[in-house]
């Protein structure tokens, strides 16, 4: 069974439709990219998946748990990395990680073990005992990633994690995400950097105005868009098909 | 300086600030509504306190003690052998004469004998009566023979308890009289001395009880203020909220943790204030009193800590709840400032009014804590009273916590946007014109709208909550700054202008601005017969039940009752009953109902559930009457009228109830029947209440039956 199953998901804010009829699934050991321009509904879809928003229609399941009816249970199985780093500036990295670890009801000894492992994997050595407000963007994002994976969740939801990072930091993060995928994690990765998605994702869902335009592997999507040279070009052609005019 | 750049920057800053509706509400509506409201409340409380103080007769005993002259400044402790028979007779005569003069000149002094018969002359018993509160002051006379032997004026000492206001008042009254009279048969006045019987520790506690409770409550609130903002709005602003909410922790647990953290910080602030203030008072008294330290009852000061913990929990929960509503730090400050003042007001009232901790004051949040802190400080707190205060405060805190947890919902916090912000002009139009915009967007079937409106459900094109609050704010401002002035000028003409031109006029302007028929704004529909019948029954019975409730919960002072009687029937007797009925019953029934059960109730109903909208409208209705003593009955009446208007789907039944309610009170007052009713025996009063309750229940049932069918509701 796929680790993540989203079926006919709909989310309305008043009269505005943020997500409509969205369906996709993610297997363990797979990176699924949710792509689209700003305002396409990526963040809303991921927030529903993370149990932060209640769907207006349809369903979202994480390891078989319906996030709408059992959000806390679902949240125990997933790690959510938001667009902002979400760290408490006046706490040290270690304090932040212990705080979230305890919210996940992890014993302190296990948190300490995980910190030791993550410290190596994410190169956190000198960062953990500094106040988060003194860290650079890239350093904050590494601590933030450690926070998201601290409880070793089976599913990772990463909402535009490379926004604002420099090339090296982005590269480091992508490498880490691949490593997690190789450890068998199911990863949902949203971005509006199409090139990044092409580099990283096993499968991609193109989201536009809340609806899924197309889904498939990067080569399949390019092929579907009349042999587009890049994912960006494929996306533009698909939008044109929907809108009936060239998109800008 | 480049003026153009300055103007550009200034315009941008003004535009940005004025687009924040909440800031505007606090800037404009808050000072114009809340400050008058608080001042009204305080004025009434102070006036009532003064009236009650003046009306209360001081209980004074006059005794004669031979040892006074020998031990001036100390408590007299004579022995019966000190009294020679001749002196005893002279003293008795003197006491009687002085007592008679006190009563004649004072008017508000009652000369009483000490409780224990036969011990009045020994001086010890009267002082213990003074300590116990049986007496307010004791006047002790020196033996005439001692004065004659000394060749000096007769000594007289006034004993009082400076830790009791009634005793201080008695001392003032007695001294005023004594300064004007001479001893019988003498040309020289008395040699008067004054002594307070209160021990230093009691004085220390009394001084602290005057200032400490209010300061502690205020500082505890202040201690909660910034932490509450920081952990709610601050979390949201710093971008950590989404991460936190994605953790598998229940919202209630999350908010409980946050509230407890705020409460601990606030408790610390309150406790430090108690300690600091106690030491300051003690040292301050030492500096002011030539090195004589004021004794601080440290145990009692420590006991007041008992109030700090629940206060911290309550204010922490309330402030966290308000902070959870805010979108950022600045907005939280904007929202919390009025809340801070409103939370502070009950404590201020309690502090100024010297209320007694009993009945309703046991459960008024803020007031009860202040009074309990005072009673703890002076050693008058009872375990039952303390339990009631602490229990009710913890209950309110728990409710606020639940509310905060409800508000801290990721759906609301993450989904809300600032999209509604508009320019100042557009905002003002928006406040009164939102319904029109909706109408323009959607073509709503008129009959469907009417049927939904009849059912009390939100209707397309109906007033918004913003409209409701703005209309109330405007009406209150008009009432406070213009209508009261008009009514002081000429009661009946002023009242008619205020009601027809003010309240109804405001609703009419609102309807015009929204391009909606006044009938629709008011939900002025033909009611069902059962609704009218129910309204008549409620109108006939409601005032009886509300009157009984008001008397039990918060009995109004006698002078207010007299004022109401004069309002209904002026002493000159030149106002016919029909004029009073028109001005005081029919007019408010139409005009006040139009405002409160019209756009205010309908607007609040758009945001809140039916019961909550009724309750809020009732509170606003009670507030508009600007009378603390009538607040509870008018608020309850307002809630009842709102329920009737929503349930029946028409404003007419609530107008009928309002008319009959006011009309009944006016007729009773006009013919003096209310005073006759007060003199009825208890069984007769009970019979009236039973009939009223039966009518009330019947009225409620009839109104419920008048509810439009399910299909007509949304």
Image (tube, coloured by chain):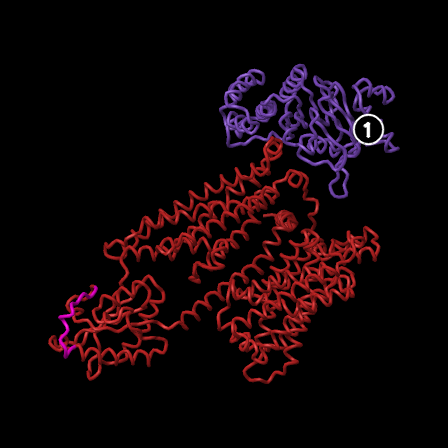
Chain colours: A purple, B red
Magenta region: B75-87
- The answer for which chain carries disc 1 is A
Question: Circle 1 sits on which residue?
Answer: A213
Q: Is residue A9 left or right of residue A168?
A: right
The vertical placement of B460 against B700, above or below, is above
Nearer the observer, A138 or B599: B599
Residue at point 82% right, 18% down? A220
Residue B31 picture quarter: bottom right
Question: Which quadrant holds the N terminus of chain A?
Answer: top right
Circle 1 SS class: strand
Question: Which quadrant holds the C terminus of chain A?
Answer: top right
Nearer the observer, B476 or B693: B693
The vertical placement of B668 against B197, above or below, is below
Residue A165 picture quarter: top right
Local packing at callout 1 (Cα closer than 10 Å; few below 14, some 14-19, many 20+) is some
Residue at point 31% right, 75% down? B111
Residue at point 64% right, 25% down? A77
Residue B472 picture quarter: bottom right
Residue B665 picture location, percent across and down: 60, 74
Q: Is residue B196 left or right of residue A156?
A: left
Magenta-drawn stretch contains B391: no
């Amino acid at each position: 069974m796929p680790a993540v199953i989203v079926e006919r998901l709909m989310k309305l804010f008043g009269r505005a439709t943020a997500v409509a009829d969205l369906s996709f699934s993610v297997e363990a050991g797979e990176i699924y990219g949710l792509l689209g321009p700003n305002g396409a509904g990526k963040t809303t879809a991921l927030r529903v998946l993370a149990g932060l928003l209640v769907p207006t229609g349809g369903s979202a399941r994480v390891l078989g748990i319906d996030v709408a009816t059992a959000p806390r249970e679902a949240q125990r199985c997933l790690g959510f990395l938001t667009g902002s780093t979400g760290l408490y500036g006046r706490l040290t990295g270690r304090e932040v990680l212990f705080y979230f670890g305890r919210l996940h009801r992890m014993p302190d000894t296990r948190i300490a073990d995980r910190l030791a492992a993550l410290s190596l994997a994410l190169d956190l050595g000198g960062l953990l005992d500094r106040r988060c407000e003194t860290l650079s963007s890239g350093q904050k994002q590494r601590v933030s990633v450690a926070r998201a994976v601290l409880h070793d969740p089976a599913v990772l939801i990463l909402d535009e994690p490379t926004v604002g990072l420099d090339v090296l930091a982005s590269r480091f993060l992508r490498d880490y995400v691949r490593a997690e995928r190789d450890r068998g994690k199911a990863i949902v990765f949203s971005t509006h950097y199409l090139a990044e998605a092409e580099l990283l994702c096993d499968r991609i869902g193109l989201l536009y105005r809340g609806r899924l335009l197309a889904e498939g592997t990067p080569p399949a999507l390019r092929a579907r868009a009349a042999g587009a040279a890049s994912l960006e070009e494929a996306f533009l052609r698909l939008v044109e098909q929907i809108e009936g005019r060239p998109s800008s | 300086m480049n003026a153009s750049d300055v103007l550009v920057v200034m315009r941008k800053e003004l535009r940005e600030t004025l687009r924040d509706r909440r800031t505007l509400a606090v800037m404009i509506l808050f000072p114009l509504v809340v400050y008058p409201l608080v001042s009204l409340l305080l004025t009434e409380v102070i006036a009532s306190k003064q009236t009650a103080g003046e009306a209360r007769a001081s209980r004074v005993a006059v005794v004669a003690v031979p040892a006074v002259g020998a031990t001036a400044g100390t408590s007299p402790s004579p022995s019966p052998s000190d009294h020679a028979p001749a002196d005893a007779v002279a003293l008795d005569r003197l006491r009687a004469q002085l007592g008679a003069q006190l009563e004649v000149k004072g008017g508000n002094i009652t000369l009483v004998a000490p409780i224990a018969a036969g011990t009045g002359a020994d001086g010890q018993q009267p002082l213990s009566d003074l300590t116990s509160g049986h007496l307010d002051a004791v006047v002790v006379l020196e033996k005439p023979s001692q004065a004659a032997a000394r060749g000096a004026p007769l000594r007289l000492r006034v004993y009082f308890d400076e830790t009791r206001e009634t005793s201080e008042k008695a001392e003032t009254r007695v001294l005023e009289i004594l300064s004007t009279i001479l001893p019988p048969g003498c040309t020289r006045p008395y040699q008067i001395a004054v002594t307070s019987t209160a021990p230093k520790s009691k004085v220390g506690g009394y001084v602290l009880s005057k200032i400490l409770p209010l300061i502690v409550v205020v500082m505890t609130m202040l201690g909660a203020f910034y932490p509450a903002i920081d952990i709610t709005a601050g979390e949201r602003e710093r971008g950590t909220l989404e991460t936190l909410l994605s953790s598998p922790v229940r919202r209630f647990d999350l908010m409980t943790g946050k509230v407890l953290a705020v409460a601990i910080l606030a408790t610390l602030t309150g406790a430090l204030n108690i300690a600091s203030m106690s030491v300051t008072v003690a040292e301050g008294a030492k500096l002011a009193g030539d090195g004589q330290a004021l004794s601080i009852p440290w145990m009692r000061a420590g006991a007041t800590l008992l109030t700090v913990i629940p206060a911290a929990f309550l204010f922490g929960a309330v402030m966290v709840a308000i902070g959870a509503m805010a979108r950022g730090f600045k907005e939280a400050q904007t929202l919390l400032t009025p809340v801070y003042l409103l939370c502070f007001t009950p404590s201020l009232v309690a502090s100024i009014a010297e209320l007694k901790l009993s009945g309703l004051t046991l459960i008024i949040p803020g007031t009860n804590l202040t009074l309990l802190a005072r009673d703890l400080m002076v050693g008058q707190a009872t375990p039952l009273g303390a339990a009631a205060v602490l229990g009710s405060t913890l209950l309110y805190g728990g409710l606020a916590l639940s509310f905060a947890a409800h508000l801290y919902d990721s759906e609301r916090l993450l989904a809300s946007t600032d999209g509604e912000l508009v320019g100042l002009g557009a905002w003002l139009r928006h406040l009164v014109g939102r319904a029109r915009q909706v109408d323009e967007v959607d073509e709503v079937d008129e009959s469907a709208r009417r049927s939904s409106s009849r059912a009390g459900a939100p209707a397309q094109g109906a007033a918004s909550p913003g409209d409701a609050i703005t209309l109330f704010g405007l009406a209150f401002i008009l009432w406070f700054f213009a209508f009261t002035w008009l009514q002081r000028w000429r009661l009946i003409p002023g009242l008619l202008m205020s009601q027809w031109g003010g309240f109804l006029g405001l609703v009419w302007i609102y309807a015009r601005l929204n391009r909606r028929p006044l009938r629709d704004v008011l939900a002025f529909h033909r009611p069902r017969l059962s609704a009218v019948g129910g309204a008549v029954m409620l109108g006939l019975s409601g005032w009886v039940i509300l009157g009984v409730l008001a008397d039990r919960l918060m009995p109004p002072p006698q002078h207010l009752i007299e004022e109401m009687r004069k309002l209904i029937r002026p002493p000159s007797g030149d106002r016919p009953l029909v004029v009073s009925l028109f001005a005081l019953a029919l007019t408010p029934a139409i005009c006040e109902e139009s405002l409160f059960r019209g756009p205010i109730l309908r607007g609040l109903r758009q945001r809140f559930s039916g019961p909550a909208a009724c309750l809020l409208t009732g509170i606003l209705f009670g507030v508009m009457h600007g009378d603390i003593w009538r607040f509870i009955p008018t608020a309850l009446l307002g809630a009842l009228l709102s329920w009737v208007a929503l349930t029946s789907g028409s404003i007419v039944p609530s107008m009928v109830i309002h008319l009959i309610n006011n009309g009944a009170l006016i007729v009773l007052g006009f013919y003096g029947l209310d005073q006759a009713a007060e003199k009825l025996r208890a069984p007769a009063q009970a019979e009236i209440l039973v009939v009223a309750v039966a009518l009330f229940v019947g009225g409620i049932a009839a109104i419920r039956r008048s509810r439009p069918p399910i299909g007509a509701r949304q």
